[in-house]
Amino acid sequence: MTGLVVALRLQRGGRKVTVEMTGAESFSLSLRLAEELHPGQALEREAIEQLIGRDRLETVYRRCLALIARRPRSRTELKRYLRARKTGDEEAQDVLGRLAERGLVDDREFASQWVDNRQSFRPRSLRALRMELRRLGVAEPDAREALDGVRENDAALAAARKKAARLYESVRGDPKSRRMFENKLTAFLASRGFDFDLSRETARTVWMEQAEPDRRESDA
């Protein structure tokens, strides 16, 4: 069956166009795809179905772009998203291929960015980072390369220092302040995946750093 395009009407929001037809049902397309059409154009049923399929693919692609804009995504994360959207395997491969061509799907780069971000804002142990990358579907070689520069002691110290000032103020002046501080900081570091001995040693080190100004003041 052949239908004729009667009109192309921009929808509210300006992102989609309604293609009004005679001899076939009206349908919606993205602006980009609608530019291929004009009033009076004849469309076979197969051509309409292809346009609708391309539009569906374009919608999924742009949703993936929106996800990546919020934060980088691993290939596995995007596959899970596409599966949840009931995207067919062939369509999913098409979307992932387009993203890869633009450099937006690269697990090696993703793993490196993930580790850098964690160590800058929420430092954690190598074990915790490795588990996160595995959960995100990053292959072991890419994870290993991203974790190569992480030093466990430095990461524990960075994590402790981010927590230390507020924690010190919360126990300052208490007769048991040192024990409370070290116990709480040790538990915090353990929650970030660091082993107990390193957590305890780091907590002691950071206690000395926090308490030093008070000691100097009392000695003056």
Image (spheres, helix red, strand yellow):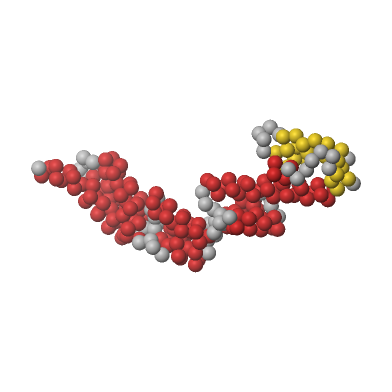
In the picture shown, does residue 32 fall above or below 91?
above
Q: Among all residues in the image, which is located at the extreme left?
A: 220
Left or right side of 184 for 71: right
Residue shown at the point (32%, 51%) measured from the top left: 160
Q: Can residue 192 be seen in this view?
A: no
Residue shown at the point (32%, 58%) measured from the top left: 154
In the picture shown, does residue 166 fall above or below 191?
above
Left or right side of 89 for 205: left
Quadrant for the C terminus in the image: top left
In the picture shown, does residue 208 fall above or below 10?
below
Quarter occupied by residue 169: top left
Position in image of residue 101 (x %, y %) = 60, 58
Residue in the foreground of this view, choosing between 124 and 21:
21
Residue shown at the point (21%, 40%) measured from the top left: 173
Left or right side of 36 for 130: left
Residue in the foreground of this view, choosing between 19 and 141:
19
Q: Among all residues in the image, which is located at the extreme top?
A: 12
Residue shown at the point (10%, 44%) measured from the top left: 219
Position in image of residue 164 (x %, y %) = 29, 47
Residue in the foreground of this view, choosing between 148 and 51:
51
Total numbered labels = 0
Q: Is residue 51 visible?
A: yes
Position in image of residue 135 (x %, y %) = 52, 58
Position in image of residue 191 (x %, y %) = 39, 53
